Image: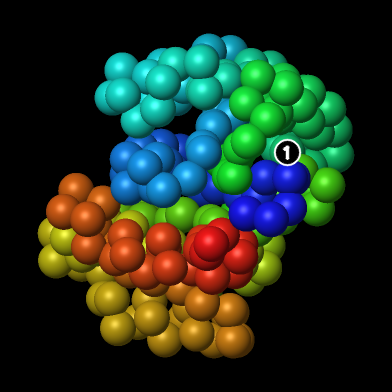
Amino acid sequence: MVDATPLRLGVGGPVGSGKTALLDALCKRLRDRYQLAVVTNDIYTREDAEFLIRSAALPAERILGVETGGCPHTAIREDASMNLAAIGDLQERFPDLDLIFIESGGDNLAATFSPELADLTIYVIDVAEGEKIPRKGGPGITRSDLLVINKIDLAPHVGASLEVMERDAKRMRGERPFVFTNLRTGEGLDVVIDFIEHHGMLHT
């Protein structure tokens, strides 16, 4: 990247939707091309950060866990100071960073990232929550830069129609993109990477 300021990419979504699995896969695919770091948000633990360290997504010193306490939505929206401090710490340690992922704590559909915290946002939902999730709306569904509908392999088992989810996602999002993924197999991951590189202007 020409700009010395790294791209800050917010990843949100309900608990269990696959946010950490997405980050794990993205880090492993992008770490040889770009200088990466991750900030995770958990209420009282650093569980997501520890998962990424155990899976060797990145070296441990490139992963910071923020314990938000109380309401995790505040730490990515109204008072992003803890996350901004963590980003500042990582930038001091690694001045050549290209991309910093910020994973929110478990979100409801109303949670959004502060514009001062994230340049781009990805919101992850999963098929197991039911086909009605896209049409429930909320800023995560309607205003995220990319909507990821994960765990498509579970659709037959939970009686969810991907066709209905696609129709509702188009209706709720207008021109904003969305992608179906199965992170266990890597299906859809290339689309997510292309989105990040194109919209984040990461191409060298």
Q: Quadrant of residue 91?
A: top right
**Helix, strand or loop at disc 1?**
helix
Residue 21 placement, left or right of 171: left
- Viewer-nearest residue: 88 or 41: 88
The answer to whether one can see residue 108 in this image is no
Q: Position of residue 62 (x, y in %)?
A: 52, 23
The image quadrant where one finds the N terminus is bottom right
Q: Which residue lies under the disc numbered 1? A: 76
Instruction: Please tell me whether residue 75 is drawn above or below residue 200 in the rendered image.
Output: above
The answer to whether one can see residue 153 in this image is yes
Instruction: Please tell me whether residue 99 is drawn above or below residue 193 in the rendered image.
Output: above
- Viewer-nearest residue: 106 or 203: 203
Q: Quadrant of residue 31?
A: top left
Colour scheme in use: rainbow
Mark 1 neighbour class, 10 Å CA radius: few under 14, some 14 to 19, many 20 or more: many
Residue 12 placement, left or right of 162: right
Q: Position of residue 96 (x, y in %)?
A: 63, 36
Residue 161 placement, left or right of 200: left
Residue at 85%, 33% (x, y): give it.
79
Q: Position of residue 75 (x, y in %)?
A: 75, 31
Residue at 62%, 26% (x, y): give it.
94
What count of labels does the image hold?
1
- Viewer-nearest residue: 199 or 128: 199
Q: Quadrant of residue 39?
A: top right
Instruction: Please tell me whether residue 37 is drawn above or below residue 89 in the rendered image.
Output: below
Q: Position of residue 92 (x, y in %)?
A: 72, 22
| Three-letter amino acid code of the residue under disc 1 | Ile
Instruction: Please tell me whether residue 164 is drawn above or below residue 91 in the rendered image.
Output: below
Residue at 57%, 19% (x, y): give it.
65
